Image: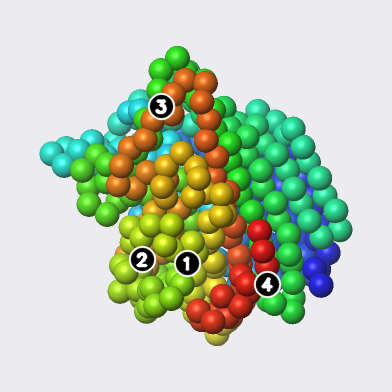
Amino acid sequence: MSQPITVTHTLGERILVTSGGVELLTYVYAPDPDPFEARKPYVHPLRTLAGGLVSGYRPNDHRWHKGLQMAASQLSGQNFWGGDSYLGPEKGYRRVDDRVGSMRHDGFSDFEVTEDRLRFVERLTWLEFGGQEWAAERRTIELHSVEPAEGTWALDWSLHLINVRDEPLRFGSPTTAGRELAGYTGLNWRGPRDFTDGNVFGPGSMGGEGQAGAAQLMGAPASEVSWIAFTAERDHDDAHSTVLFCHAPENAESIHASHWFVRSEPFPSVALSWAFFEEFELPPGESFGYRYRVLVADGAWDRDRAEAYLGTHQW
């Protein structure tokens, strides 16, 4: 049985969801103060039902990493990821302020709260550095299935993106620009410090302990690996937490094949990359969409536990 939730919306700033006295998440859509971090909405903190923190915020190695957020590291010469831009093998990463874009919150077209579910539809505009409107996004966020018996709750994240330019948008990644195994773009999670060297696994025999497990999944196609789990022991409270990342079945029919970007070291991060190895173009007036699910759980789940949950909780 799903546990009730409480939603507190501070207009123009953030949405807080609590359940059982625990802050499960805060969705922040107020603009960040520093444009170099690519202003865009994000989710932080993310917590388990027992209160375990499973997201990182502005770590000293990448200040633009903020919990869970949608980003695009290479988009027609602009950087909607934040921070230094990758300019190719010869130049590497450089600070180029006028390459860093932003996402503008334009309002909510739907906002529904029931006893045990939150669903809202947000309108956003992707702006290049100079303020030109490049894309219009419809984002749907749903928090549901808060189940103490399972020790978990679920967050669904969907986007529908339309090119509003008069020329194609080219989506890529540092890997498409020449950096090996740096295909980060799309929905991205940054874990807290105590998730470093955590275990990462997927269906079948994919993955394993620490960075060796993450390396097995780096670049894996979503067509073969529809979900991965990241589990680690937390600091302070002698407990473990697990985060599962899942592709919706219809993502296989979207504009471009997705792959996994996974690191356990030197920092914990997962991206459901839509342009890991190859660029794709979105023509003017055309659109694409993806849907994802993030499960936040107490305990050190194994593959059997993850597959049993996914088998009883369908899309």
* Local secondary structure at mark 3: strand
Q: Residue at x 54, y 68 (%)?
A: 243
Q: Residue at x 52, y 49 (%)?
A: 251
Q: Quadrant of the C terminus?
A: bottom right
Return the residue at label 1.
Answer: 228
Image position of 185 with respect to 302: above or below: above
Give amino acid for label 1: Ile
Q: How many marks?
A: 4
The colouring scheme, among rainbow, by chain, secondary structure or one colour, is rainbow
- In space, the residues marked 4 and 3 are separated at their CA atoms by 39 Å
The circle drawn on residue 101 is: none
Return the residue at label 3.
Answer: 169
Are the two marked residues, 1 and 4, in contact with CB atoms closer than 8 angstroms? no
Name the mark nearer the viewer: 2 or 4: 4
Give amino acid for label 2: Leu
- In space, the residues marked 1 and 2 are separated at their CA atoms by 8 Å
Are the two marked residues, 1 and 2, in contact with CB atoms closer than 8 angstroms? yes
User: Residue 197 versus residue 259: which sits nearer the camera?
Assistant: 259
- Residue 146 image position (x, y, % from top left): 74, 67
Return the residue at label 4.
Answer: 312
Residue 82 seen in this snapshot: no
Query: Which of the marked residues, 2 or 3, is nearer the chain's N terminus?
Result: 3
Give amino acid for label 3: Leu
